[in-house]
Image (cartoon, helix red, strand yellow):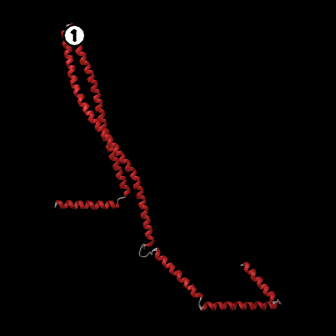
Amino acid sequence: MLKLLRKISRYITAALTGRFNELADPKVQLEQALTEAQDQHRRLTEQAANVIANQKQTEMRLNRVMEEMEKLNGSTRQAVMMADEATKRGDTDKAAEYSRAAEAFANRLIAVEKDAESLKELSLQSAQASDQAKAAVAQNSSVLQKKLAERQKLLSQLDQAKMQEQMNKAMASLSATVGQDVPSMNEVRDKIEQRYARALGTTELTGQSVEARMLEVEQSQANSEAQARLSEIRSQLGLSAAEGATGTAGGTTGGTAGA
């Protein structure tokens, strides 16, 4: 039962993750990934700074111990010399006191030398850790810079992808039906061309019909009657046919020019 519940849980998690990845904005996810990388670099830098600080503190302690060791070495030598001088003078009490002081300085010198040896080893280890920390920070910084450069490239590709998707949708809408009541551009073009071709055909048929010829005859008859009436008016006015023809031609020319 427990195994089945685990399978169901993993399946639901995978399904929700896939759905989330489909709906999530790639630009937001890219910024999240970059922010996480920057946070990791910051934490690594802080850890490296602590390692380097530890190495610096070890060096300072070692320097102080070395200085103390040098002083103790000098004090021990001085106490031995003073004890020897007191012995030569025959002052056994002073000689004994200086000898005890020299012995005390020697004991402290031995302890400080042991501490110095430990600090030397620790300083060497700290120096190696510090070098590794510096190398890790430098390497991670280089990786972060590459991610920043890749971020600009990915953002540019994302904008191009969005533009291309919009263009594909626009091109598809030109040749595909938007809805049940909205025709496509191809359908509209075919419909217009069909009406235009039908209109041209109708015009040609009308120009060759009997009605068109009858209309032409009636128009010619009207023109003849008009000419006869003009001739009659000219006779009443005592105008010759030649003058009437000239006037008619002039009037016609003037009318044409005026038109």
Quadrant position of the C terminus in the picture:
bottom right
* Residue 219 found in image quarter: bottom right
Q: From the image, tell me which residue sits under label 1.
A: 86
Q: Is residue 173 left or right of residue 88?
A: right
Q: Is residue 10 left or right of residue 246?
A: left
Residue 217 x/y as whole percent: 66, 91
Q: Identify whether 100 is placed above or below 65.
A: above
Residue 21 x/y as whole percent: 32, 59
**Image point (34%, 52%), residue name:** 33
**Image point (53%, 82%), residue name:** 197
**Image point (78%, 87%), residue name:** 245
Q: Identify whether 223 is placed above or below 164.
A: below
Pointer 1: residues within 10 angstroms few (<14), some, or many (20+)?
some
For this orientation, the residue located farthest to the left is 1
Q: Identify whether 189 is placed above or below 235.
A: above
Residue 150 x/y as whole percent: 39, 52
Quadrant position of the N terminus in the picture:
bottom left
**Image point (18%, 13%), residue name:** 96
